[in-house]
Image: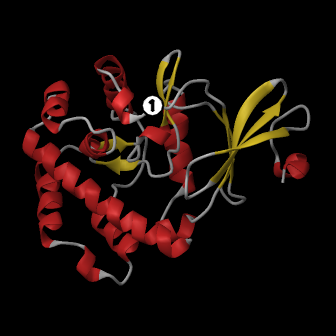
Amino acid sequence: MLADWRAIGLPFRGAPRLLAPLPGGRTNRSYLIEADAARFVLRLDGATAALGLCRDHECSFHAAAAAHGLAPPLVFADASRGVMVTTFVEGEHLAPASLDDERLGALIDVLHAVHELDVAAPATDYRALDARYRGDDAAASPGDWQAHLALLEAAARRGPCHHDPVPANVVFGAGGPVLLDWEYAGNGFPLLDLAVLACDWQVPRAHLAARTGSAPRLLDAACEVYAQLCRGWAACSARCD
């Protein structure tokens, strides 16, 4: 694929060189490449249709976040070819047990900044998303999940969300945390980003609610909604494999 870099339109002066495949990610394939004496991440899209991903929305959110230092600079994107190139960010991925209070605070600050971005996008329809993920398995969506979602719809604010700030998608660099993989970003409930901290980063809900000023009952509801979406996503991804 890199042999066709000029035809694809990659904005390099010289031919890019493949350095290594990057681990992680079931939806896409990513590679570390080098060009013009710098390193970049080349991502090749996958499973876009099955998971209902909108690459145009992804680029809008990623570009807005990158302008505020919340995401790696976006170098190139062509949704029709399923190609994206971003600047490689030096840093480390932390295991949940290594997330101390200082770095938790930095990550919360980044998420709050994401939630204040100015990005035009339709409201995320979580019911439609759950139905897409589940396919024909209607019994997989418990009734109490609908009640938790209804509570968020009635009482939680909407705004730009990353929707997937799991440990694999956060790089702690010299300037603080940077968020990767914006393909699930949308205009949703910011509490769902905090739910990821509770569910995937294993931050105690009471501590998280106190640190963020979130209403405990709404954070609990967000965690239940997020958990259901994760179950559906896993089932959908398994069908795509």
Q: Callout 1 environment at 10 Å: few (<14), some (14 to 19), or many (20+)?
A: some
Q: Quadrant of residue 232?
A: bottom left
- Tell me the residue at 56%/24% (across/down): 91
Would residue 219 be visible to someone looking at this image?
A: yes
Q: From what the image shows, is residue 138 above or below residue 165?
A: below
Lateral position of residue 125 relative to residue 165, left or right: left
Lateral position of residue 156 relative to residue 178, left or right: left
Q: How is the image coloured?
A: secondary structure
**Which of the pair 14/59 is nearer the observer?**
14
**Which of the pair 115/170 is nearer the observer?**
170
Count of all numbered marks drawn on residues in the image: 1
Q: Quadrant of residue 45?
A: bottom right
Residue furthest toward the front? 97
- Tell me the residue at 45%/31% (across/down): 94
**Residue 81 placement (x, y as % from top left):** 72, 59
Rendered-image quadrant of the N terminus: bottom right
Q: Quadrant of residue 158?
A: top left
Lateral position of residue 233 relative to residue 191, left or right: right
- Tell me the residue at 35%/48% (across/down): 187
**Residue 184 placement (x, y as % from top left):** 45, 52
**Which of the pair 30/62 is nearer the observer?**
30
Q: Secondary structure at mark 1?
A: loop
**Amino acid on which the number 1 mark rests in the picture:** Leu
- Tell me the residue at 47%/66% (across/down): 52
**Residue 58 placement (x, y as % from top left):** 52, 48
**Residue 124 placement (x, y as % from top left):** 34, 57
Would residue 125 be visible to someone looking at this image?
A: no
Q: From what the image shows, is residue 36 above or below residue 241?
A: above
Residue located beneath label 1 in the image: 94
Q: From what the image shows, is residue 113 above or below residue 143?
A: above
Rendered-image quadrant of the C terminus: bottom right
